[in-house]
Image (cartoon, helix red, strand yellow):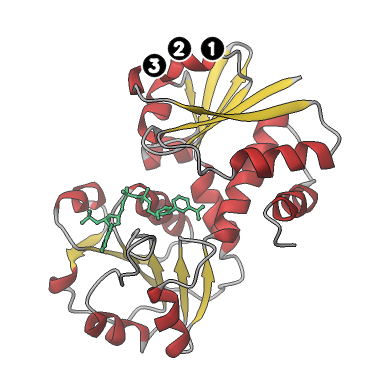
Amino acid sequence: MKFLCVIGDPVKHSKSPRIHNNAIKSLGLDGIYTRYHLQEESELRNLFFKLKLNGANITLPFKEQALKIADIKDKFAQEIGSANTLVLKNNQLYAYNTDATGFLKAIEDFKTIKKALILGAGGTARSIAFALKQREIQLCIANRSKERLEHFKAFQSVVYEDLRDFDFDFVVNTTSAGLNDENLPCDKKILDKILSHSKYAFEVIYGKQTPFLKLCKQYQVEYKDGLLMLLWQGVFAFELFFDIKNQQEKIKSAMLEALNLK
Ligand code: NDP
Protein backbone atom coordinates (compact mmCIF):
# COMPACT_ATOMS: atom_id res chain seq x y z
CA MET A 1 0.00 0.00 0.00
CA LYS A 2 1.21 3.51 -0.85
CA PHE A 3 1.13 6.12 1.92
CA LEU A 4 0.70 9.63 0.56
CA CYS A 5 0.24 13.00 2.18
CA VAL A 6 -0.01 16.74 1.62
CA ILE A 7 2.28 18.73 3.90
CA GLY A 8 1.92 22.46 4.50
CA ASP A 9 1.14 25.29 6.91
CA PRO A 10 -1.82 25.76 6.84
CA VAL A 11 -3.06 22.54 5.27
CA LYS A 12 -6.59 22.12 6.64
CA HIS A 13 -8.14 23.74 3.56
CA SER A 14 -6.27 21.51 1.08
CA LYS A 15 -8.41 19.63 -1.43
CA SER A 16 -5.58 17.21 -2.22
CA PRO A 17 -6.68 14.35 0.11
CA ARG A 18 -10.16 14.45 -1.37
CA ILE A 19 -9.09 14.44 -5.02
CA HIS A 20 -6.29 11.89 -4.65
CA ASN A 21 -8.32 9.45 -2.54
CA ASN A 22 -11.13 9.50 -5.06
CA ALA A 23 -8.69 8.82 -7.89
CA ILE A 24 -7.15 5.93 -5.90
CA LYS A 25 -10.62 4.45 -5.40
CA SER A 26 -11.69 5.00 -8.98
CA LEU A 27 -8.57 3.36 -10.44
CA GLY A 28 -8.70 0.50 -7.92
CA LEU A 29 -5.22 1.23 -6.57
CA ASP A 30 -3.86 0.38 -3.14
CA GLY A 31 -3.12 3.59 -1.31
CA ILE A 32 -4.21 6.22 1.17
CA TYR A 33 -3.67 9.98 1.05
CA THR A 34 -3.80 12.16 4.16
CA ARG A 35 -2.66 15.63 5.34
CA TYR A 36 -0.03 16.83 7.80
CA HIS A 37 0.28 20.27 9.35
CA LEU A 38 4.02 20.96 9.59
CA GLN A 39 5.32 24.09 11.25
CA GLU A 40 9.07 23.59 11.24
CA GLU A 41 10.60 23.73 7.76
CA SER A 42 13.80 21.96 8.84
CA GLU A 43 11.75 18.90 9.84
CA LEU A 44 10.41 18.21 6.33
CA ARG A 45 12.79 15.42 5.33
CA ASN A 46 12.66 13.71 8.74
CA LEU A 47 8.89 13.87 8.70
CA PHE A 48 8.68 12.25 5.27
CA PHE A 49 10.67 9.25 6.51
CA LYS A 50 9.10 9.19 9.98
CA LEU A 51 5.62 8.92 8.42
CA LYS A 52 6.97 6.19 6.09
CA LEU A 53 5.56 8.02 3.09
CA ASN A 54 5.89 6.86 -0.49
CA GLY A 55 5.05 10.29 -1.81
CA ALA A 56 3.87 13.75 -0.79
CA ASN A 57 2.57 16.98 -2.17
CA ILE A 58 4.26 19.95 -0.57
CA THR A 59 2.35 23.17 -0.33
CA LEU A 60 3.00 26.65 1.11
CA PRO A 61 5.39 27.63 2.57
CA PHE A 62 7.66 24.62 2.06
CA LYS A 63 8.00 24.28 -1.72
CA GLU A 64 11.55 25.66 -1.78
CA GLN A 65 12.55 23.46 1.14
CA ALA A 66 11.08 20.44 -0.68
CA LEU A 67 13.53 21.01 -3.51
CA LYS A 68 16.45 21.49 -1.12
CA ILE A 69 15.94 18.24 0.78
CA ALA A 70 15.55 16.01 -2.30
CA ASP A 71 18.31 13.65 -3.46
CA ILE A 72 17.31 13.80 -7.13
CA LYS A 73 15.84 17.00 -8.57
CA ASP A 74 13.81 17.11 -11.74
CA LYS A 75 15.08 19.69 -14.29
CA PHE A 76 11.80 21.67 -14.18
CA ALA A 77 11.81 21.88 -10.37
CA GLN A 78 15.46 22.85 -10.30
CA GLU A 79 15.03 25.67 -12.76
CA ILE A 80 11.93 27.01 -10.99
CA GLY A 81 13.61 26.73 -7.58
CA SER A 82 10.76 24.87 -5.89
CA ALA A 83 9.02 21.49 -5.82
CA ASN A 84 5.44 20.52 -5.00
CA THR A 85 5.82 16.74 -5.32
CA LEU A 86 8.20 14.36 -3.53
CA VAL A 87 8.40 10.67 -4.42
CA LEU A 88 10.44 7.93 -2.75
CA LYS A 89 12.14 5.57 -5.22
CA ASN A 90 14.86 3.10 -4.25
CA ASN A 91 15.25 4.89 -0.93
CA GLN A 92 15.97 8.21 -2.65
CA LEU A 93 13.80 11.28 -2.54
CA TYR A 94 12.88 12.69 -5.97
CA ALA A 95 11.52 16.26 -6.35
CA TYR A 96 9.20 17.49 -9.11
CA ASN A 97 7.20 20.63 -9.88
CA THR A 98 3.82 19.71 -11.34
CA ASP A 99 2.42 23.26 -10.88
CA ALA A 100 4.31 24.32 -14.02
CA THR A 101 3.28 21.31 -16.11
CA GLY A 102 -0.26 21.56 -14.72
CA PHE A 103 -0.50 25.19 -15.80
CA LEU A 104 0.75 24.39 -19.33
CA LYS A 105 -1.81 21.62 -19.68
CA ALA A 106 -4.56 23.95 -18.42
CA ILE A 107 -3.85 26.50 -21.15
CA GLU A 108 -3.10 24.09 -23.99
CA ASP A 109 -6.03 25.33 -26.06
CA PHE A 110 -4.80 28.95 -25.85
CA LYS A 111 -2.84 28.38 -29.03
CA THR A 112 -1.50 31.62 -30.37
CA ILE A 113 0.16 33.37 -27.44
CA LYS A 114 3.20 35.42 -28.36
CA LYS A 115 3.49 37.92 -25.54
CA ALA A 116 2.30 37.44 -21.95
CA LEU A 117 2.07 39.54 -18.81
CA ILE A 118 2.21 37.92 -15.37
CA LEU A 119 0.65 39.91 -12.53
CA GLY A 120 2.34 39.03 -9.23
CA ALA A 121 5.82 37.78 -8.39
CA GLY A 122 5.34 35.03 -5.79
CA GLY A 123 6.00 31.29 -5.98
CA THR A 124 3.17 30.60 -8.41
CA ALA A 125 4.39 33.35 -10.74
CA ARG A 126 7.81 31.63 -10.79
CA SER A 127 6.32 28.29 -11.87
CA ILE A 128 4.14 29.97 -14.48
CA ALA A 129 7.00 32.11 -15.85
CA PHE A 130 9.07 28.98 -16.29
CA ALA A 131 6.17 27.18 -17.94
CA LEU A 132 5.56 29.99 -20.42
CA LYS A 133 9.28 30.16 -21.18
CA GLN A 134 9.00 26.52 -22.34
CA ARG A 135 6.48 27.70 -24.94
CA GLU A 136 8.91 30.44 -26.01
CA ILE A 137 6.47 33.19 -25.11
CA GLN A 138 7.84 36.69 -24.59
CA LEU A 139 7.25 37.59 -20.93
CA CYS A 140 6.87 40.55 -18.64
CA ILE A 141 6.27 40.27 -14.88
CA ALA A 142 4.57 43.12 -12.97
CA ASN A 143 4.14 43.34 -9.20
CA ARG A 144 2.98 45.90 -6.60
CA SER A 145 6.32 45.85 -4.76
CA LYS A 146 9.93 45.56 -5.92
CA GLU A 147 11.34 42.95 -3.54
CA ARG A 148 10.04 39.77 -5.16
CA LEU A 149 10.87 40.99 -8.68
CA GLU A 150 14.45 40.05 -7.74
CA HIS A 151 13.61 36.45 -8.69
CA PHE A 152 12.74 37.45 -12.25
CA LYS A 153 16.02 38.89 -13.45
CA ALA A 154 15.91 36.68 -16.54
CA PHE A 155 12.73 38.48 -17.67
CA GLN A 156 11.47 41.99 -18.13
CA SER A 157 10.01 42.90 -14.72
CA VAL A 158 8.46 46.09 -13.35
CA VAL A 159 6.25 47.49 -10.61
CA TYR A 160 2.76 48.32 -11.92
CA GLU A 161 3.37 52.09 -11.98
CA ASP A 162 6.34 51.63 -14.32
CA LEU A 163 4.45 49.55 -16.87
CA ARG A 164 4.57 51.36 -20.22
CA ASP A 165 3.71 48.57 -22.64
CA PHE A 166 0.09 47.36 -22.40
CA ASP A 167 -0.02 45.21 -25.49
CA PHE A 168 -0.10 41.55 -24.33
CA ASP A 169 -2.20 38.79 -25.85
CA PHE A 170 -2.26 36.79 -22.58
CA VAL A 171 -2.57 38.04 -18.97
CA VAL A 172 -2.13 35.77 -15.94
CA ASN A 173 -3.19 36.92 -12.49
CA THR A 174 -1.06 35.03 -9.97
CA THR A 175 -1.70 37.42 -7.06
CA SER A 176 -3.88 36.51 -4.10
CA ALA A 177 -5.64 39.89 -4.43
CA GLY A 178 -9.04 38.34 -5.21
CA LEU A 179 -8.84 35.60 -2.59
CA ASN A 180 -10.39 37.13 0.54
CA ASP A 181 -10.28 40.83 0.08
CA GLU A 182 -12.04 41.08 -3.30
CA ASN A 183 -9.37 43.36 -4.80
CA LEU A 184 -8.04 43.76 -8.29
CA PRO A 185 -4.30 43.02 -8.48
CA CYS A 186 -3.54 46.63 -9.49
CA ASP A 187 -5.17 49.94 -10.35
CA LYS A 188 -8.21 49.43 -12.59
CA LYS A 189 -6.98 52.04 -15.09
CA ILE A 190 -3.88 49.92 -15.75
CA LEU A 191 -5.96 46.76 -16.17
CA ASP A 192 -8.36 48.58 -18.49
CA LYS A 193 -5.46 49.36 -20.82
CA ILE A 194 -4.12 45.80 -20.61
CA LEU A 195 -7.40 43.91 -21.04
CA SER A 196 -8.50 46.04 -23.97
CA HIS A 197 -5.58 44.46 -25.90
CA SER A 198 -5.68 40.88 -24.62
CA LYS A 199 -7.12 37.77 -26.16
CA TYR A 200 -6.73 35.33 -23.24
CA ALA A 201 -6.53 35.54 -19.44
CA PHE A 202 -5.93 33.17 -16.54
CA GLU A 203 -6.76 33.57 -12.84
CA VAL A 204 -4.90 31.16 -10.51
CA ILE A 205 -7.62 31.35 -7.85
CA TYR A 206 -10.41 28.84 -8.41
CA GLY A 207 -14.02 28.41 -7.40
CA LYS A 208 -15.00 32.07 -7.37
CA GLN A 209 -15.63 34.93 -9.75
CA THR A 210 -12.81 37.27 -8.68
CA PRO A 211 -12.84 41.00 -9.53
CA PHE A 212 -10.11 40.22 -12.11
CA LEU A 213 -12.34 37.63 -13.84
CA LYS A 214 -15.32 39.98 -13.76
CA LEU A 215 -13.24 42.56 -15.58
CA CYS A 216 -12.04 39.98 -18.13
CA LYS A 217 -15.68 39.16 -18.82
CA GLN A 218 -16.46 42.83 -19.32
CA TYR A 219 -13.67 43.04 -21.91
CA GLN A 220 -14.81 39.77 -23.55
CA VAL A 221 -11.41 38.22 -22.96
CA GLU A 222 -11.45 34.41 -23.10
CA TYR A 223 -10.44 33.18 -19.63
CA LYS A 224 -9.89 30.18 -17.38
CA ASP A 225 -9.60 29.98 -13.63
CA GLY A 226 -7.23 27.93 -11.45
CA LEU A 227 -9.39 24.81 -11.26
CA LEU A 228 -7.80 23.16 -14.30
CA MET A 229 -4.32 23.97 -13.00
CA LEU A 230 -5.21 22.44 -9.62
CA LEU A 231 -6.56 19.33 -11.32
CA TRP A 232 -3.68 18.84 -13.74
CA GLN A 233 -0.97 19.37 -11.11
CA GLY A 234 -2.82 16.70 -9.13
CA VAL A 235 -3.04 14.33 -12.12
CA PHE A 236 0.70 14.64 -12.84
CA ALA A 237 1.60 14.14 -9.16
CA PHE A 238 -0.70 11.09 -9.02
CA GLU A 239 1.03 9.57 -12.06
CA LEU A 240 4.38 10.04 -10.33
CA PHE A 241 3.15 8.53 -7.03
CA PHE A 242 1.83 5.37 -8.71
CA ASP A 243 4.25 5.30 -11.64
CA ILE A 244 1.41 5.03 -14.16
CA LYS A 245 0.85 6.51 -17.60
CA ASN A 246 -2.01 6.84 -20.11
CA GLN A 247 -4.78 7.16 -17.52
CA GLN A 248 -4.85 10.93 -17.28
CA GLU A 249 -8.48 11.45 -18.29
CA LYS A 250 -9.66 8.81 -15.82
CA ILE A 251 -7.63 10.35 -12.98
CA LYS A 252 -8.81 13.85 -13.86
CA SER A 253 -12.41 12.78 -14.02
CA ALA A 254 -12.19 11.12 -10.55
CA MET A 255 -10.54 14.24 -9.14
CA LEU A 256 -13.21 16.46 -10.64
CA GLU A 257 -15.92 14.20 -9.24
CA ALA A 258 -14.33 14.58 -5.80
CA LEU A 259 -14.75 18.32 -6.06
CA ASN A 260 -18.43 17.79 -6.91
CA LEU A 261 -17.99 19.62 -10.17
CA LYS A 262 -18.45 16.87 -12.66
P1 NDP B 1 2.89 34.30 -2.75
O1 NDP B 1 2.61 34.73 -1.36
O2 NDP B 1 4.21 33.67 -3.07
O3 NDP B 1 2.74 35.62 -3.72
C1 NDP B 1 1.60 36.42 -3.67
C2 NDP B 1 1.68 37.50 -4.77
O4 NDP B 1 0.44 38.21 -4.74
C3 NDP B 1 2.78 38.52 -4.57
O5 NDP B 1 3.22 38.97 -5.83
C4 NDP B 1 2.03 39.65 -3.84
O6 NDP B 1 2.62 40.94 -4.05
C5 NDP B 1 0.69 39.60 -4.54
N1 NDP B 1 -0.41 40.13 -3.77
C6 NDP B 1 -0.96 39.62 -2.62
N2 NDP B 1 -2.03 40.35 -2.22
C7 NDP B 1 -2.14 41.36 -3.13
C8 NDP B 1 -3.04 42.46 -3.25
N3 NDP B 1 -4.02 42.67 -2.37
N4 NDP B 1 -2.87 43.29 -4.31
C9 NDP B 1 -1.88 43.09 -5.20
N5 NDP B 1 -1.00 42.08 -5.13
C10 NDP B 1 -1.12 41.22 -4.10
O7 NDP B 1 1.69 33.36 -3.18
P2 NDP B 1 1.67 32.23 -4.31
O8 NDP B 1 2.30 32.74 -5.56
O9 NDP B 1 2.17 30.95 -3.79
O10 NDP B 1 0.09 32.03 -4.51
C11 NDP B 1 -0.68 33.02 -5.15
C12 NDP B 1 -2.08 32.51 -5.41
O11 NDP B 1 -2.05 31.38 -6.25
C13 NDP B 1 -2.84 32.07 -4.15
O12 NDP B 1 -4.10 32.68 -4.17
C14 NDP B 1 -2.93 30.56 -4.29
O13 NDP B 1 -4.12 30.06 -3.69
C15 NDP B 1 -2.98 30.41 -5.79
N6 NDP B 1 -2.50 29.10 -6.29
C16 NDP B 1 -3.31 28.36 -7.12
C17 NDP B 1 -2.88 27.13 -7.62
C18 NDP B 1 -3.79 26.34 -8.49
O14 NDP B 1 -3.51 25.16 -8.71
N7 NDP B 1 -4.84 26.88 -9.01
C19 NDP B 1 -1.55 26.57 -7.30
C20 NDP B 1 -0.76 27.43 -6.43
C21 NDP B 1 -1.25 28.65 -5.96
P3 NDP B 1 3.85 41.46 -3.09
O15 NDP B 1 5.09 40.78 -3.58
O16 NDP B 1 3.84 42.93 -3.32
O17 NDP B 1 3.48 41.08 -1.69
Horizontal side, residue 130 vs residue 159: left or right: right
Secondary structure of residue under mark 3: helix
Horizontal side, residue 182 vs residue 48: left or right: left
In the picture of the structure, the residue carrying the numbered disc 3 is: 43
Q: Residues within 10 Å of mark 1 (few under 14, many from 20)?
A: few
Q: What residue appears at the point 47 percent right and 37 percent down from the top-left corner?
A: 11
Q: CA distance from mark 3 to mark 2?
A: 5 Å
Q: Are marks 1 and 2 in contact (CB under 8 Å)?
A: yes
Q: CA distance from mark 1 to mark 2?
A: 5 Å
**What kind of residue is marked 1?**
Phe
Q: What residue appears at the point 39 percent right and 40 percent down from the top-left corner?
A: 79
Q: CA distance from mark 1 to mark 3?
A: 10 Å
Q: Residues within 10 Å of mark 3 (few under 14, many from 20)?
A: few
**What kind of residue is marked 2?**
Asn
Q: Are marks 3 and 2 in contact (CB under 8 Å)?
A: yes
Q: Mark on residue 168?
A: none
The quadrant holding residue 30 is top right
In the picture of the structure, the residue carrying the numbered disc 1 is: 49
In the picture of the structure, the residue carrying the numbered disc 2 is: 46
Q: Position of residue 207 (x, y in %)?
A: 54, 63
**Is residue 145 placed above or below 88 in the rendered structure?**
below
Q: Position of residue 112 (x, y in %)?
A: 52, 76
Queried on whether the Cβ of the residue with tag 2 lies below 8 angstroms from ligand 1, the answer reads no
Q: Position of residue 80 (x, y in %)?
A: 38, 42
Q: What residue appears at the point 53 percent right and 10 percent down from the top-left corner?
A: 50
